[in-house]
Amino acid sequence: MLRFLFFYLQFFTAAWPREADTVKMIFLGDIMQHQTQLEAALKPGGNKDSSSHYDYSQYFMHLKENFKKAHIIAANIETTFAPPPYSGYPAFNSPHALLEECVESGINLFLAANNHAVDKGSRGLKGAIALYQKIGLPYTGIYSDDKEANTQHPLIIEKNNIKIAILNYTYGTNGIGVPSPFVVNTMDTSKIKSDLNKAKSKNPDFIISCMHWGEEYKLSSSAKQKKWEEFLYKHGTDLIIGAHPHVPQEIDIHRDSLGKIKHVTAFSLGNSISNMTARNTRIGIMLEIILVKEKQTSRTIIDEPAIHWIWTSRPAATGGYYTIIQMKDYLDNPLKYNLKGENHLIESYYKTFSKRFNKTN
């Protein structure tokens, strides 16, 4: 009995170190900007070619409390920031006001490698890079030239004595060539292996690969994603965060023989906000991950991830604007959100996906 108690205390102490540094991260899926979103954000009587005439203050207003409790909030920005005119699908181009609102709300890490990165050619890449650099917060996945790509990727972020390497890639750019001398990180095995070796040489505590991959509207990962997952973990990745399918896909947790988390793969977080109408594109995941580093031993731990289900509410329900709501909070406190005609739909989606993922966060 004493031997069992000693083993239990040893395991408990190892799993939950008393003296440790922590970093809480939040990951959001695709932030998109369709034409109807542009129209809803334009202020009454505003000039559609003037960024300052767009108001996005409602987008993240229900998520700010979560953001305040996290150190790093990352999002996939699936649009360009070329000069006007602004446009939605199929060639996205958004006002600077969208990214400025992301920053104002608390998002502080931008993933820019996606299939729409080259929608506006060199003007879109130049404008996006200039805007990211102007706001002064870390971004990754697109670069002005090879030199910039080589010096800035992998992105290294240090917070609370924890060093994190962030890598970001897309499967492609919708068949549009990347104009010289710009660089968009695409999924190439030799390139990614080299980047992971480079990341490891910087001695990070964690390596996170953010992948724009998979099949659109599929609720389960593809064989290609599984193959890439195996490759990424083989060469040093600790966590994988996926985007592109526009619907949530499974989150796999890989553990060692003692139950400690070795890897977490979120194959797709789905959309954060969009005007997509296909089934399951209004529900997404706000994924919360806590990374831990024991002070005395420098041993690292990935805590149990938390899934927060989110929903895009649209002008018909809100009275004129788009916003992201937390589904469980809405179902617990519907009067707080003042939405019209969505209760049954939100409840149905929440129950279906919570059961599917076996999570109720």
Image (cartoon, rainbow, N blue to C red):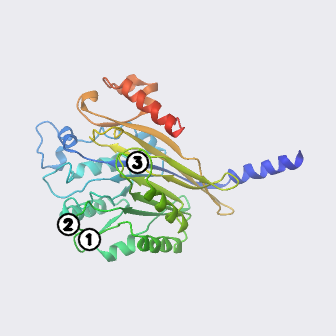
Q: Secondary structure at mark 3?
A: strand
Q: Amino acid at mark 2?
A: Ser
Q: Amino acid at mark 3?
A: Leu
Tag 2 and tag 1, C-beta contact below 8 Å: yes
Whether residue 214 appears in this view of the structure is yes
Up-down: is 120 above or below 284? below
Q: How far apart in space, not on screen, are marks 2 and 1 (Cα)?
A: 8 Å
Which image quarter holds the N terminus? top right
Q: Which residue is mark 3?
A: 28
Image mark for residue 70: none
Identified at 50% across, 65% down, the residue is: 231
Identified at 26% across, 42% down, the residue is: 56
Crowd rating for badge 1 (residues with CA inside 10 Å; few <14, some 14–19, many 20+): some
Q: Which residue is mark 2?
A: 122
Crowd rating for badge 3 (residues with CA inside 10 Å; few <14, some 14–19, many 20+): many
- Residue 14 locus on image (x, y percent): 71, 54
Q: How far apart in space, not on screen, are marks 2 and 3 (Cα)?
A: 26 Å
Give whichever of 26, 229 is nearer the camera: 229
Identified at 38% across, 75% down, the residue is: 150
Q: Amino acid at mark 1?
A: Phe
Q: Which residue is mark 1?
A: 182
Q: Secondary structure at mark 2?
A: helix
Identified at 25% across, 46% down, the residue is: 33
Q: Secondary structure at mark 1?
A: loop
- Residue 114 locus on image (x, y percent): 32, 58
Tag 1 and tag 3, C-beta contact below 8 Å: no
